Image: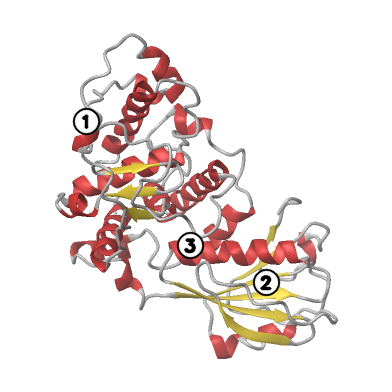
Amino acid sequence: MTPVPVTPEFQRLISGSRLRLRGKSAFFATLLLHAEFVPSREVAAAGTDGERVYVNPEVAAGLAPDVLDGLLLHEVLHAALSHVQRRGPREKKRWNRSADLIVNGMVTAAGLPTPPSRAGAARDEHLEKLSVEEVYTALDGEPDGDGEDGDDLLDGPPGDVPPRNGKPSPNVARQWQQALAQARSVDAMSGGKGDDPLGLHRELMRLAPARLDWRAQLWRFLARTPVDFGGFDRRFVGRGLYLEALDDESLNALIAVDTSGSVDDDAVRALVGEVQGVLGAYPHVRATLYYADTEAYGPHALSPGGEIPPPQGGGGTDFRPIFTLLDAHEPDVLIYLTDGYGDFPEQAPRVPTLWVVPPGGLEDGGFPFGDVLRLEEHA
């Protein structure tokens, strides 16, 4: 079957929904920013295989804006809560009804209408606070209802979706868990509670990581922008503009990587890959990469999913060459991956600085300025 093209109209539908949701909830908007939306005419309205969200472009174009927002959030929540992967051998239709009941409650609490094709699950304010496994048990013996419209949890991509470029992610659940952590972090910065904006939903509590890992902290650092989930965006919502309209209000990040031999390639790939993820989720963030030992090598423009330039350098460590570039680049933030053993500039820069330190690096107190973020052993 011929794949459905990703048209500018489809991209505008998704961008518009993301921006509208940013005006309602930083938590849910961040989850939407992490989702990959793919057009497909084989889904009735929308569906997910747990990794991507598939949207029927003709159906989506005919929906009222708030109904479209509710539909997309519904599917993203299914993916973020691993409802596809957790079904196991359970009966598919009852599992889908159980998951819909929980997700419908969250969508309604977010101030959005329940998608028409998912409205079959009646509200139950007690059950919707439980885990999907508990709801599945509670619905044992109840009639399944008519039709297949509610079966939006897919066993794989629809037939009109081309294969991925490369293999599917081996750990989709962990990626969504990190997205949830980042959503909580951004929500806390924007004045929310930073945990569960809807109350004690057992589904969200069940998947909550014990703490924010370094990736979530990096996202939090890069989210410190005037266009991020605040009153500024609300003015754009009223004028009907989309995320692309925020490009002129960009945040420029300068990324520096110590190549003196004390930082291994895995740490470099982990940091640069995560920065590329931020670029894909936040269109207004720009990033420029330099490698450095006693000199600075670059610049290299970073892009979402782009190739990581091969490292340059290998000599001693001197942080000062990077800091001399600040006047030329005028970045909003500086992120420096290093073990911390080198020559620092005598004066702290005006630019917020984040030192990203691999295991075995300099203790926090050894950095004369800036914030320190520590990579984990498995990074």
Q: Mark 2 or mark 1, which is nearer the start of the sequence?
A: 1
- What mark, if any, has residue 119 been given in the picture? 1
Please name the residue shown 29% across and 41% down the image: 110
Label 2: which residue? 336
Secondary structure beneath dot 1 equals loop
Q: The C terminus appears in which quarter of the rendering?
A: bottom right
Q: Mark 1 or mark 3, which is nearer the start of the sequence?
A: 1
Secondary structure beneath dot 3 equals loop
| Marks 1/2: CA–CA distance | 49 Å
Bin the neighbour count of mark 3 within 10 Å (Cα to Cα): few under 14, some 14-19, many 20 and up.
Answer: many
Bin the neighbour count of mark 2 within 10 Å (Cα to Cα): few under 14, some 14-19, many 20 and up.
Answer: many
325 shown above or below 103:
below
Q: Nearer the viewer, mark 3 or mark 1?
A: 1
| Marks 3/2: CA–CA distance | 17 Å
Report the residue that reaches farthest toward the bottom. 328
Callout 3 amino acid? Ala
Callout 1 amino acid? Ala
